[in-house]
Image (tube, helix red, strand yellow):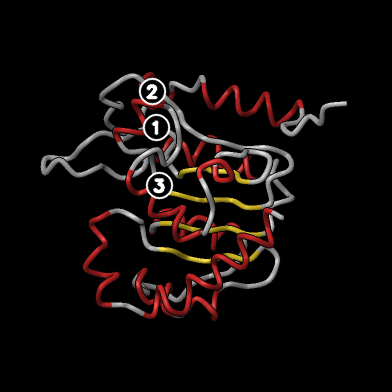
Amino acid sequence: MAVDINGSALAKLESRIRACRICVESPYKTALPHEPRPVLRVSMTARLLVASQAPGIRVHETGLSFNDASGDRLRQWMGVSREVFYDRAKVAIVPMGFCFPGHDLHKGDLPPRRECRGHWHDKLFAALPQISLILAIGRYAINYHFACLERPLPKNLPSGEIIRRWRDFAGSTPRLLVLPHPSWRNNAWLKCNPWFEEELLPVVRAEVAAAIS
């Protein structure tokens, strides 16, 4: 007999998120400049959560989370194949903004839309109590998930310092590990912080393996 990895309540909530048009029809400020295409992957069995920022343009075009060069680097950091990464029974992927937010004047990606967090995230994570490991990528995901778990961070602490002090903040259940965004834009930071690959990534890979086993 097949196992319903989504569950009826979670499946209904996911369907509502995928049909969401709040940022076009009743936006917080400026409307989304294109048609919404919410992207997420959830199930009732995934114990690993990849908590990211917002889809980029390639993910918006394909509808598949981290289907780009950043995703290749992230999977390498995690020590998993594409097949495992996209197995929703094992890995949930939930960005802080479900849709590609558009580009700013310098052709960089805009921040995640506030409508997603305000309308959906608390409900969604309440429906995922089995998560045991969270990989928080980027400041918006870091701020939300630490607050959600009632683990306040020191005020004005830079993301790089949170990553460097990961042992101080990881906690136990669920474990919360902070990663820089795997974009090429962080190549300089990675080059200046070799401890990230030497010290933190082996821990990330071991904990990811335990969460998906």
Element under disc 1:
loop
- Residue, disc 3: 71
Ranked by sequence position, the earlier of labels 2 and 3 is: 2
In the image, taking residue 179 as reference, residue 128 lies left or right, namely: right
Image quadrant in which you'd find residue 132: bottom right
In the image, taking residue 75 as reference, residue 41 lies left or right, namely: right
Kindly identify which numbered label has been placed on residue 156. none
Of labels 2 and 3, the one closer to you: 3
In the image, taking residue 156 as reference, residue 169 lies left or right, namely: right
- The residue located at (57%, 65%) in the rendering is 176
Quick check: 203 above or below 137? below
Kindly identify which numbered label has been placed on residue 36. 2
Binning the other alpha carbons within 10 Å of mark 2 as few (below 14), some (14 to 19) or many (20 upward) gives some
CB of mark 1 within 8 Å of CB of mark 2? yes
Nearer the observer, 25 or 78: 78
Look at label 3 and name its amino acid. Gly
Q: CA distance from mark 1 to mark 2?
A: 6 Å
Q: CA distance from mark 2 to mark 3?
A: 21 Å
- Residue, disc 1: 99
Quick check: 206 above or below 15? below
Ranked by sequence position, the earlier of labels 3 and 1 is: 3
